[in-house]
Image (tube, helix red, strand yellow):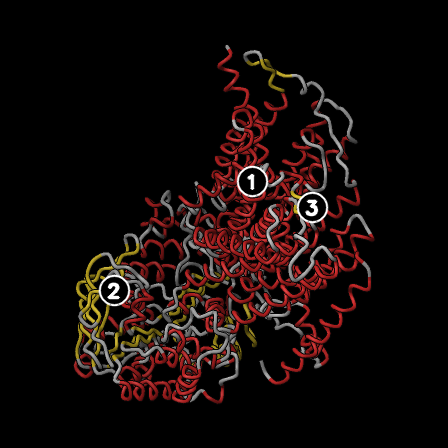
Amino acid sequence: MAGIDAILVPLLSGLSEGVVLFLVASGLTLVLGVMRIANFAHGGYFMLGAYFAYTLLRGQLVGVLPFVAAVLGAAALTGAAGYLSELLLFERFYRMPRMQMLLGTYALLLILEGIAQQAWGLFPITQPEPMGFIAGLTVGGTQVPYYEFFLILVGLVAVVGLEYLLRRTAFGRQVRAVAEDRLMGSLLGIDVGRVYALMLALGVALAGLGGALTAPTVGLIPDIAVQFVIQAFAVVIIGGFGSVTGSLVAALLVGVMTSFLVSFAPSVASFSLYLLMALVLLLRPQGIMGRPWEEEER
Amino acid sequence: MRAGGRWWAVALAVAVVAWAVAVPRLGLGQLALWEDVAIQVLFATSVNLLLGYANIPSFGQAAFYGAGAYTVALLAQSAWPPLAALAAAVAVAAALAFVTGLITSRVTGLAFSMVTLAIGQVLYTFVLQSNAAGGEGGISGVAPPARGLFDLTQPVHLWWFILLCVAVAMLALWWVVSSPFGRALTAIREDPKRAAFLGIAVRRYRVMAFTIAGGAAGLAGGLYAYSTTIVAPAVLNWTQSASPIMMALVGGMHTFLGPALGAVLITWLLYVLGQATRAYLLYVGVVLLAFVLLVPRGIVSIPDLLRRLAGGRRATGAAPEVTP
Amino acid sequence: MPEPRLEIEGLDGRYGTAHVLFGVSLTVGVGETVALLGRNGAGKSTLLKAIARVEVETTGAVRLQGQDLTRLMPHRVARLGVQLVPEDRRVLGSLTVQENLELGRHAAAPDRPAPSLDEVVSLFPTLAPLLGRRGRELSGGEQQLVAIARAMMGRPRLLLADEPSEGLAPAIVRQVGEVLSALRTQGDLSILLAEQNARFALDLCDRVYVIDGGRIVFGGRPEELRGERELERRYLAL
Amino acid sequence: MSLALRLEGVTKRYGAHVVLDDVTLDVEPGTLHAIIGPNGAGKSTLFGVVSGEHTVARGRVLLGGRDVTRVPAATRVGMGVARAFQVARVFPDLTVADNVLVAVLASHRLTQVFWRRRVPERTEREARRALERMQLTALADRPARSLSQGDRKRLEIGMALALDARLLLLDEPTAGMSPEETAATTRLIREVWRETGVTVLLTEHDMQVVFDLAQRLTVLHRGRVLCTDVPERVRERPDVAEVYLGVSAQHA
């Protein structure tokens, strides 16, 4: 069947790319929704996650289990780095006027990229996909790498996990309370500073996870920090500030749309993301799932 | 400007002219550096019209800077005279800014920063794809025709031409901020709702300021094209939008010359670091972070800060114990 | 007078640049209900916020059973058993009533274990059918009850209620009054009740303070205040 | 110069919550008219409706006989509606003189002029006169943020008057003031009203101020007009004591 694979193959590859985009964007949107801070450094943590995975595996070809372990390890390390930077820096950023705050996170992005330049160099390095994932399932005559199915599975787990954490646990309740009304949260005895630190760690760990999963599919250079964060921001805008579900829908939409455009209209593919964003802004400024964004003028 | 300010202005003008005369004797490398400094001074000042005077947190000014650069680069291929090409650069950038301003006038605050950032990125990715604009390689060999009042193929002539353009533009921006319109902008910055209840149509003023700043950024970009002779998509990348904001903060927003000071320091620092190390980003980041955390009102606030420290009082007002 | 639970001495308070409390001193005893009366802008809310350590900068002493509160973060104060029910109630709109109540548990401590949900709901029978409702779908009166019930979930030692009767219909005000008077008999709970509505507050309290222009201008028993026609006229009435 | 205000059956809702319920109100040109009522009665919302900040669900707003129900706030400013906020809103980082100057420029529709560097001498003069009238000349070069609450309120009223106000909306003009400042502000409002003949609509919690100033009084309770009358008669109504003070009549 020639028809099925023409649809199914780009769909699968789009979904798998969308998953990575979702992981990074969901971390960004959580931090934005709870702490009201646009974290430019987010891309830096994405980059760190990718380099951490490379370093843990020393760039070697390994089996599936060591690979999964390394990816989780990289995400945890990135989260720890995020926790540390929250205590050292972000805690001060929250109280700053908007521009100062944005430049603070931008400075952190530059620092992270600079550290990567020192530690891993300026030239592309590669981390192979895990053994057994290079091959794939044949769909109507075309091979779809197992790695794509693996990514989709990871996305599914992440969505269910996040949903459970935010909706069903005491911590999630605290997070939602603090996101809606920080003052009331502290009046009820919630340690807002601790919630913030953990949320930043979680958000950044998601970026790290996305980075680690991306490592096998790109040539790693420090500059991915700067490039990827903007795509993630665009997804967050399309989905609506602070909405995890919005980010999911937007990321999958963008992934699939780009994937189809690459096959059918390659010249539009790379900036279709931003076109979609502009369209959403014109028709629905608060994003697909967002509520109207109210912010104090500062 | 007060009487004391007038002396400062004269002293500043003398120093600038003296430096301008001295630079060509330091060699071509230095000439290129200081041309870039002059251009960044204009770019940072134009961005500060938005940030410092109107509190419009645009993160997409690279779009207008880049639009100016590409306009000049394309027109130079058809041998347009420099002044006409620069005028076109200003017009294109201002028109683009006007449209962007209209589209985004419904959003404010952080959302506005994000939206302008992303719109800038649309242009960047578009140019990367565009054959007319030379794709990833951009346009090289930008040169003004060798005729007219200035022979801009001569490096020293080009230097004076750029300085003159920057000086004129800076005066024009100074004119704007001290005009009645400039006062209205500062009022909007302080309290938009209050301004609306004085009968000021806030949104229209924001679009106007956005257009003027965009035009000035376009001029800076156009001059950049002549100075470097190469225009690549990188001039449109979002980090190019962050850089003048960084300069404005380091120099000092809310003042006219602060951002210029920041532009001089940062451009020079980038040059020195770029020669000394491959990881210059790290050091730029550290310097910026230090300013964000310790001197958020920029270099211009340092004398005041020192005075207060010497006076034995704390430099910054004590933050309320807890304000969640 | 019972042993003091809350003692305030010489408290000055500032909101940014505005000086709003001047040398306030008062006490609330264990198990006592104290009313704080005054017209709008007299400094009632500010005083309650100063005790809860939010928004107001203070100098002077605030002690809870001998422990100084003035250097603590607000969540620490809450965990010591001080619960503020703010003027605007601040029921979280995106959370259900049950989730709002569960949040109240965070202020409980090992020596003051949180009550069960059923225990609290039995005090507020109107809330029983509303547990699954989102906060933003409630009426003003229901929100007030949720706010008080939520505070009770932390088993407070001291309840600070900021104008609980404000903006509510008379029937609902009566209901809120009934709840508060039921709470007075709950263990040794102390209540500091800020009100503009003098009649409502005087019926509920053991002692009363009147605040005006950020200063305490009267302290005594409700009967004593009822005799002070001049005070009533200047600070409470026409 | 004064403007009449009329509200006809104005209803304003926030979701299911009715803030203003069928409010009908006449403010005669040139009067000093006060609106009182307990917290949550809808006073600030009513100001928002008159100034054009809020839209209404039902009813009409008339200024000097013209229906302005759908007219935006900035246009109403042009018709002479000037507003002072409950917490004085001035431009904190501008000097006192610049605050007034912006208001004068706005009233002459000069704020869009970016091609002339200097502010016209005429407007400068006018701004100086406004400062003198408000007795703020000594503070002219201070940033507005350094002013006391009372001085800020004065500055805000000065800015409103610089707009050639014909209807002045004052939301709790003495809130947060010391007794001395309250007395001075009361005096100032009366003087301004006498000199300019402007219509003044104010809300106030301090009954002393209300009875000192107001010619007519409207009592608002839970979004409804309880009564409108001269102060002496309002004072005597038992239902007003009941809803407004929460103290039953026998104690009062």
Secondary structure of residue under mark 3? loop
Q: For residue C85, say whether it is visible.
A: yes
Rounded to the nearest angstrom, the CA distance separating label 3 from label 2 is 74 Å
Quickly name the residue at label 2. Answer: D222
Q: Vertically, is D197 above or below A129?
A: below
Residue type beneath disc 1: Phe
Q: Nearer the viewer, residue D237 or C98?
A: D237
Q: Nearer the viewer, residue B147 or C200?
A: B147
Q: Nearer the viewer, residue C144 or C113?
A: C144
> Which tag is nearer the camera, tag 1 or tag 2?
1
Mark 2 surroundings: few (<14), some (14-19) or many (≥20) residues within 10 A: many
> Going by the image, does B12 lie left or right of C118?
right
Secondary structure of residue under mark 1? helix
Which of disc 1 and disc 3 is earlier in sequence? 1
- Residue in the image at 53% along x and 16% along y: A5
Q: Vertically, is A63 above or below B128?
A: above
> Which tag is nearer the camera, tag 3 or tag 1?
3
> Which tag is nearer the camera, tag 3 or tag 2?
3
Q: Which quadrant is the N terminus of chain B positioned in?
A: bottom right
Give yes or no for contact between labels 1 and 2 (Cβ–Cβ under 8 Å). Answer: no
Rounded to the nearest angstrom, the CA distance separating label 3 from label 1 is 22 Å
- Residue in the image at 56% along x and 27% along y: A262
Quickly name the residue at label 1. Answer: B126
Mark 3 surroundings: few (<14), some (14-19) or many (≥20) residues within 10 A: some
Residue D72 percent coordinates (x, y): 30, 62
Residue type beneath disc 3: Gly
Residue C145 percent coordinates (x, y): 36, 55
Give yes or no for contact between labels 3 and 1 (Cβ–Cβ under 8 Å). Answer: no
Give yes or no for contact between labels 3 and 2 (Cβ–Cβ under 8 Å). Answer: no
Quickly name the residue at label 3. Answer: B141
